[in-house]
Amino acid sequence: MKRAQTDGFGASKRVKGGTRMKLSGLRALVVVACAVALLSVLGLGYTVSNLETIASNELIPEISAAAGMALASSYASTMTAAALEDMAVNGRTIGLRTAASGALAILYRTKTEDELTAIITGTADPMIRAAAINSMVIYLVSTKSDKKDFKLTDYLKGLATTGKTHEMRLAAAEAYYFANRGKLKAADLEAQAAKSDSDELAYAA
């Protein structure tokens, strides 16, 4: 008897000729779990010390990560960029790495477009590159060109497909949907989430 294989999320899939469970629903559950945990943590008025204790425990990764998200602001105001970059890479739990990456995202708000581009397309650890995404989106949506046939949405969609790194493609995908806000209906977004030119466009949808 053939035993069912499992993917990285523990969802079963058939070995031959079967259908693979879509991950979009699972991703949504993870996001919801993180959000619920985060709101619970903040609502209970946990101290930084409490949050660090939770973030340092990886028994339930989603809760650890949620506590890390809540720590980001505190870490951004008390730690250096160098220390945060080290923690984002070497932190012993997902919560601590998330806290550091989130804090870096706050510090990166003051960086120039060239500086952010160097980070997000460079060889740094993905947790560091991810910290540059939100600020990069702001620059991308304001991209201009002297070319007569330049169209921002086409440029962003292309970059979301051909960008050098996953993080750059994701930043471009988020910028693309921001530039198209109000133009795409829910049905359009659902269709693009199911099938797009890149995984990043599908995920951002």
Image: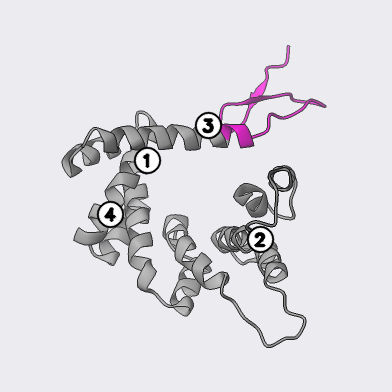
Q: Which residues are magenta?
A: 1-26
Q: What amino acid is labelled 3 in the image?
A: Leu
**C-alpha span from label 1 to label 3:** 14 Å
Q: What amino acid is labelled 2 in the image?
A: Asn
Asked whether 174 or 95 is in front, the reply is 174
Residue at the spot 56% in from the left edge and 37% down from the top edge: 27
Q: Earlier in the sequence, mark 4 or mark 3?
A: 3
Identify residue for label 3. Answer: 29
Say above or below: 54 vs 72: above
Identify residue for label 4. Answer: 73
Indicate the secondary structure of the residue bearing disc 2.
loop
Find out whether the residues at labels 3 and 2 contact each other: C-beta distance under 8 Å.
no
- Residue 180 image label: 2
Q: What amino acid is labelled 4 in the image?
A: Ser
Mark 4 surroundings within 10 Å by alpha-carbon count, few (fewer than 14), some (14 through 19), many (20 or more):
some
Q: Nearer the viewer, mark 1 or mark 3?
A: 3
Identify residue for label 1. Answer: 65
Classify the position of the N terminus by image quarter. Answer: top right
3 lies left or right of 76? right
Q: Magenta includes 91? A: no
Residue 197: where, in percent of width, then height? Answer: 74, 55
**C-alpha span from label 4 to label 3:** 25 Å
